[in-house]
Image (cartoon, rainbow, N blue to C red):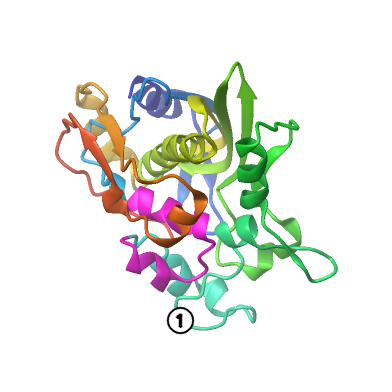
Amino acid sequence: MKQYLQLCQRIIDEGEWVHNERTGINCLTVINADLEYDVEHNQFPIITTRKSYYKAAIAELLGYLRGYDSAAQFRDIGCNTWNANANENPSWLANPHRKGEDDMGRVYGVQGRAWQRPDGSQFDQLQKVVDDLTNGVDDRGEIVTFYNPGELEMGCLRPCMHTHTFSLLGGKLYLTSYQRSCDVPLGLNFNQIQCFVLLALMARITGHQPGKVFHKIVNAHIYENQLELMRDVQLKREPYPSPQLHINPEIKTLHDIETWVTKDDFSIEGYQYHPPIKYPFAV
């Protein structure tokens, strides 16, 4: 929580204004931010200075891990974050690769589960990493990346949180996650929760003790229409202690995650929070 608030204050104090061409809205921006999350000791990084709806973030992660490519699939598991990008983004609506209503294209989990080889076959990055880690293998390239430069025009949105590297060290599994762009007031807590849960799940299904997540953000920004709420409301509130995450112990394999796991297989204990803040969303 302190890391989050320090980053918000740093953007306000040190950020420079940049006009965002995609949204048409100015952003107060800094370059490079590094955050850490302690999964080993279950310090769940959920925002406490406003209410955070963590189950939607977990549902979105489940959709990525399953390789979903439709906003309807995400809605079915309790996540509405892709409705606007799939159905309201003018450039995507005019894109010849769009297959119709709710289609997201080849984004995020599609790349992670069905990377297209030049010969037309597909490569499942996630399955390769799970297999290696289950067998105690770390070739210093246990990477799942959603960023495919050759297919960026085939999706409704370039991935923001784009690459996850898993590392085994001293009997523990670590995760380093890279993010090219971050809407800090609205999106960052989704990303924090997803990084934490991703490591917790991967450690569980591969038989390792989780360590820490190292989360690197390249471009961290606050949109102009979010600034007043962040500066004058959220940063004035005192944070509460971090809660703890509980994951259904019956989740044991990647197949479980692919088939029956839902957001209700996750719960948190001891979550104290301030009232919600409705930040505007830039499409």
Residue at 60 percent of width and 44 percent of height: 130
On screen, residue 89 versus residue 49, left or right, reads right
Out of 126 and 145, give the one closest to the viewer. Answer: 126
Residue at 55 percent of width and 43 percent of height: 181
**For residue 206, which quarter of the picture?**
top right
81 falls in the magenta region: no
Q: Is residue 84 visible in the rendered structure shown here?
A: yes
Residue at 71 percent of width and 56 percent of height: 148
On screen, residue 76 versus residue 258, left or right, reads left
Out of 176 and 216, give the one closest to the viewer. Answer: 176
- Residue 65 % position (x, y): 51, 54
The type of residue carrying mark 1 is Glu
Residue segment shown in magenta = 56-78
Reply above or below: 172 against 94: above
From the image, tell me which residue sits under label 1: 101
Tag 1 secondary structure = loop
- Residue 177 % position (x, y): 57, 36
